[in-house]
Image (cartoon, rainbow, N blue to C red):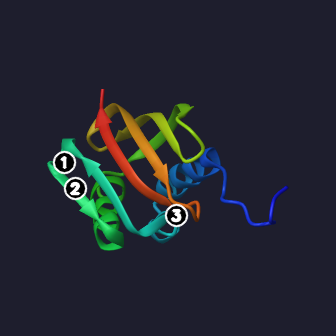
Amino acid sequence: MSDGVESPPLQATVVAFINATNAFDIERALALFSTTAVIDDPSTGSTFNKHAGVRDYLERYFLGYHTVTRLLSLERLGDVRARVRVDFTGDFGHEIGLLLVALDSAGRISRIDASLE
């Protein structure tokens, strides 16, 4: 029996993130992240920490490169983790990416480990 408070489903959070970044709505995308979130993206040579770092990442690599993302697949790795395969297009051309997404207990994104195929 549920206590009436449930975290947003993992897939819904991933789709909301993609929709927000595709709309170039940084505030809506940032609201999906915990305040202590981390994005580790070796292709950029950096790790982005907390809301300030996540904002920097979103502004640089999604807004700055006009990145549009298409969900290719989502493999659940438990209730709060998923391996997400996406198609990125933008000013840089075209890439296929893998995102390991983890949610916190409130259903917010706590970590993304990103890589390119």
Q: Which residue is mark 2?
A: 47
Q: Which residue is mark 3?
A: 32
95, above or below 65, in the image: above
Q: CA distance from mark 3 to mark 1?
A: 22 Å
Residue lying farthest front? 1
100, 3: nearer the viewer = 3
Q: Is residue 6 left or right of residue 49?
A: right
Q: CA distance from mark 1 to mark 2?
A: 8 Å
106, above or below 96, in the image: below
Q: Is residue 61 left or right of residue 111?
A: left
Q: Is residue 13 left or right of residue 46?
A: right
Q: Comparing marks 1 and 2, which lies closer to the viewer?
A: 2
Q: How far across and how far down the image is residue 20, in percent?
A: 53, 58
1, 45: nearer the viewer = 1
Q: Comparing marks 3 and 1, which lies closer to the viewer?
A: 3
78, above or below 12, in the image: above
* Residue at horizontal 34 percent and vertical 64 percent from the top: 54
**Which image quarter is the C terminus in?**
top left
52, 103: nearer the viewer = 103
Q: How far across and how far down the image is residue 60, in percent?
A: 27, 59
**Which image quarter is the N terminus in?**
bottom right
Q: Earlier in the sequence, mark 3 or mark 1?
A: 3
103, above or below 83, in the image: below
* Residue at horizontal 52 percent and vertical 54 percent from the top: 17
Q: CA distance from mark 2 to mark 3?
A: 18 Å
Q: Which residue is mark 1?
A: 44
Amino acid marked by disc 1: Thr
Amino acid marked by disc 2: Thr
* Residue at horizontal 29 percent and vertical 37 percent from the top: 115
Q: How far across and how far down the image is residue 111, in percent?
A: 39, 54
Provide the secondary structure element on which disc 2 rests. strand
